[in-house]
Image (cartoon, grey):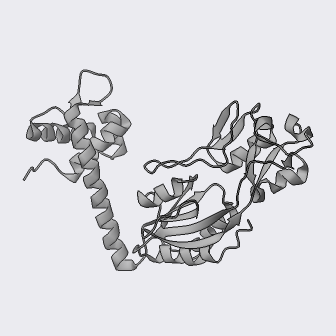
């Protein structure tokens, strides 16, 4: 048994790497620097290799230190999961619920549900993240999310429970001041080639990314969420297809105008998805409430 390879030692190694120094890591862990130095020194002695290159001003891991850190973080993650599972088994309530929302879905209904959940007075942390295209599936598969709202495209078989939320319609839109706004005929590919296209970048980290509503253009401008895409097109920065339910305010003010376009852009079905076999009171509560939401697409 390697007595120096403890959870405290792994936490110290992780903190030093993240903060860049022994002093900052000690402050982060509420320890004195000498205690951290001693912990790392004992670990190095037992492994018989240096874990940090001490010739540099910043604490830099050696290759051996990087290896210990990578595998140590897996141990810390597994330990945290074990503690969470034990606590959840006792109470039925998770310590945290992670919800990923595709940016094509409006955030207000989700915020309303979070507010309702807080009235239950359960000590459950809530993490809300934004995803785009394949990012929702990726977040579920790689445990970055317990629930994904607004996933679309090819549906993975056998991995997730699914509930259809509705369908969204896309329309080609340009700013009222954009040159294409003055064209009377149906826009075709030749009309669009001369202008930048605004595209929302896929957030998938592991799964293959997807593209949506692309067409040939002289320039692609990538943004990180659908609200930014809508605002960018309203400013006349570029053109593209927009979900009608998100663009309505800009259409009402006249900042955006719809144009008929020969490039096909079918409606998209959106789904609520969660991992099969996963349990928890918070998960079940959010799923049941999300199923009943009128998303008004």
Q: Is residue 294 left or right of residue 65?
A: right
Horizontal side, residue 8 vs residue 158: left or right: left
**Percent x, y for residue 275?**
44, 69
Between 84 and 208, the residue placed more toward the observer is 208
Q: Is residue 40 above or below residue 144?
A: above
- Give the quarter of the image for residue 217: top right
Where, by quadrant of the figure, is residue 93 drawn? bottom left
Of residues 72 and 275, which is closer to you in this image?
A: 275
The answer to whether residue 249 is above or below residue 26 is below
Which part of the image, by quadrant, shows the C terminus?
Answer: bottom right
Residue at image point 64% right, 65% down: 269
Residue under the image location 66 percent in, 35 percent down: 221
Of 240 and 52, which appears nearest the observer?
240
Q: Would you say 56 lies left or right of 95 here?
A: left
Query: Residue 113, how many percent across, how many down?
Result: 62, 70
Going 17% across and 39% down the picture, which residue do you hit?
A: 38
Residue 294 horizontal/vertical position (percent) = 71, 73
- Which residue sits furthest left? 1
- Is residue 114 among the parts visible in the rendering? yes
Can residue 26 be seen at all in this image of the molecule?
no
Residue 183, x across and y down, in percent: 90, 39
């Amino acid at each position: 048994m390697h007595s120096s390879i403890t959870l405290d030692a792994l936490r110290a190694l992780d903190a030093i790497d993240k903060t860049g120094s022994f002093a900052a890591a000690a402050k982060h862990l509420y320890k004195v620097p000498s205690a951290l130095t001693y912990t790392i020194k004992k670990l190095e002695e037992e492994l018989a290799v240096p874990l940090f290159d001490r010739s540099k001003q910043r604490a830099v891991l050696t290759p051996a230190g990087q290896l210990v850190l990578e595998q140590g973080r897996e141990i810390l993650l597994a330990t945290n999961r074990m503690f969470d599972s034990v606590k959840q088994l006792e109470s039925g309530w998770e310590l945290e619920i992670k919800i990923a929302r595709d940016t094509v879905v409006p955030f207000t209904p989700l915020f309303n549900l979070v507010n309702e959940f807080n009235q239950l007075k359960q000590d459950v942390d809530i993490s809300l993240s934004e995803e785009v295209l394949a990012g929702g599936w990726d977040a579920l598969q790689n445990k970055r999310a317990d629930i994904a709202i607004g996933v679309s495209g090819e549906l993975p078989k056998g991995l997730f429970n699914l509930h259809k939320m509705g369908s969204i319609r896309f329309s080609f839109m340009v700013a009222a001041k954009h040159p294409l706004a003055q064209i009377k005929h149906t826009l075709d590919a030749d009309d669009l080639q001369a202008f930048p296209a605004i595209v929302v970048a896929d957030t998938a980290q592991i799964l293959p990314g997807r593209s949506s509503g692309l067409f040939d253009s002289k320039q692609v401008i990538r943004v990180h969420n659908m609200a930014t895409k809508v605002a960018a097109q309203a400013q006349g920065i570029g053109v593209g297809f927009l979900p009608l339910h998100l663009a309505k305010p800009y259409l009402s003010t006249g900042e955006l105008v719809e144009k008929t376009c020969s490039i096909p852009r079918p409606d998209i079905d959106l789904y609520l998805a969660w991992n099969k076999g996963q349990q928890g009171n918070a998960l079940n509560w959010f799923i049941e409430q999300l199923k009943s939401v009128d998303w008004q697409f």
